[in-house]
Amino acid sequence: MWYFHGGIIKINTVEEKYILSIDQGTTSSRAIIFSPSGKIISKKQEEYTQFYPQKGWVEHDANEIFDTQLKVMRSVLKETGISPEQIAGIGITNQRETTVVWDKTTGEPIHKAIVWQDKRTAEFCKRLINEDYESLIRQKTGLPIDSYFSATKIWWILDNVPNALERAKNGELLFGTIDTWLIWKLTDGQVHATDPSNASRTLLFNINTSEWDNTLLDIFGIPGDMLPEVKDSNDHFGYIGKELLGANIPIEAVLGDQQAALFGQQCWQKGTAKNTYGTGCFLLMNTGSNPVLSENGLITTIAWRIDGQMTYALEGSVFIGGAAIQWLRDGLQVINDASETEALAKSVEDSNGVYVVPAFTGLGAPYWDMEAKGAILGLTRDTTKAHIVRATLEGIAFQSKDLLDAMEQDAQVNLRRLKVDGGATANAYLMQFQANILSAEVEVAAVSESTALGVALLASISLGLITDKELIARLSKGTKYTHKMPPEEVKKRCEGWKEAVRRVLS
Ligand code: ADP
């Protein structure tokens, strides 16, 4: 059952047409050209400046983001020799929550963009929590009150830039997350819009009604006139002007980065999930057409709204994923390179009773213990570095399993297959162990750029270049790991892990 595009789709498989994905990330701007069926043709990327004006503050220059983005779009076209007329459409995916406020008339931002990592509004958030707003806000938005999300960042700009609040009330200022800023710039100020996956990260969007919420706007003191129109994720978002790329190209898909990766990993049905193994691990599970409020401190978010139909997701993260491998390299100095860990892990029969709990920065869902510290447990005289390396890899997998267990419980589903991507999926030992303890299949993405692929596929389907069914038949399949560990062994290992976690809780 494919719940997007229920109607009949006009198929127009013109071979020489392509999709251009804009992948605007936290450290770089990227442009990737895809074939309609999701094959990467070419990509370009450029890093841009990170500003750290004070401890805990992180800013970007919104103009630099636009300039670097335009530059890589032009250069990927030039390099491939693909003409702008051959680009059937554009998909945009972006770092989420990062906040830009700009002057509607001049187009100039009134302050640097405040990045999702920025903690300057932590005190304001505490105040709102003390005023008992948490349960109301979680109910409406699916989110906890946290400086991570956009609302308090907008409040800060309006409160700190002279006359900003007054000007916002007069309708002179616009707000946008990075998708909205890029759309506005690319359409020469014609379109001020976002999609529900991005809107659902602002703390201002009611995920039940799929609208901006006046009660929330009042709580955060934000004039509603500043907000963008919320269109479907696969809506038409206007045209990129001829003067920018040499042809008028339509913007046909918009998704926040994690939701785009979920889409790119084809987690289109309820109960499917993806995990990205990078520095941390990022997990999302599609929970279908109803929002699930977590009992385990997970975030409820909108995955996408396609042809008016909402799909929701549960989201959570493991703070220390691949970073545990960096610690083996830079802290313990038992390896020179992350890639050595696979052979070392396989050089021993088992982890010899050793558990590594990499709670270097506390433990997140489902434990939520920020005071917890990391630990190596079960050491004996015959423990070798290979055992510790193996147990560290297993620690990454166990943490991901804890999160997935919580998601399965919240969503009342039974996960059969986990789609995975990110740097650490190169490690076959880690992937096999993950499959074993999940008692599920683990499938590594064939196309490494799941995020950019997600919006390329959504644009491609929206434009009728390919149907979702054809797409599934044509997309390349990744490496699969099937579980091989006997159930008693899985149980024993998971109990050992739980006991190890119990010892590190504060
Ligand atoms: P990010 O996007 O967060 O920078 P990447 O997806 O590039 O992360 O993945 C890099 C992370 O993966 C690093 O933390 C690194 O230690 C880990 N990593 C890379 N290769 C391996 C490997 N073969 N085995 C285990 N971990 C690895």
Image (cartoon, helix red, strand yellow):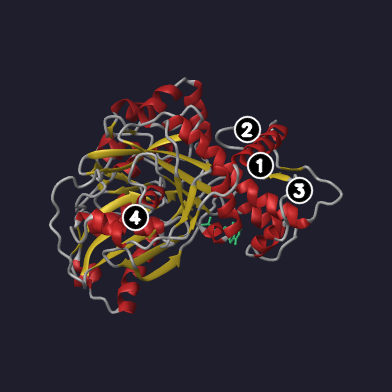
**Marks 4 and 1, how far apart at CA:** 32 Å
**Marks 1 and 3, how far apart at CA:** 21 Å
Which one is earlier in the sequence, the residue at label 1 or at label 2? 1
Q: Nearer the viewer, mark 2 or mark 3?
A: 3
The residue labelled by disc 2 is 369
Q: What residue type is labelled 3?
A: Asn
Q: Which of marks 1 and 3 is in front?
A: 3
Q: Which residue is drawn at 40% across and 40% down?
A: 150
Q: Which of marks 4 and 2 is in front?
A: 4
301 left or right of 434?
left
Q: Position of residue 187 (x, y in %)?
A: 22, 58
The reply to whether the residue tagged 3 has its Cβ within 8 angstroms of ligand 1 is no
**Quadrant in which residue 6 is drawn:** top left
The residue labelled by disc 4 is 454
The N terminus, quarter of image: top left
Which one is earlier in the sequence, the residue at label 4 or at label 1? 1
Which one is earlier in the sequence, the residue at label 1 or at label 3? 3
Describe the element under mark 2 as helix, strand or loop. loop
Q: Which amino acid does label 4 sit on?
A: Gly
The residue labelled by disc 3 is 352
387 left or right of 8?
right
**Marks 1 and 2, how far apart at CA:** 9 Å
Q: Position of residue 305 (x, y in %)?
A: 27, 42
The residue labelled by disc 1 is 359
Q: Position of residue 189 (x, y in %)?
A: 22, 54
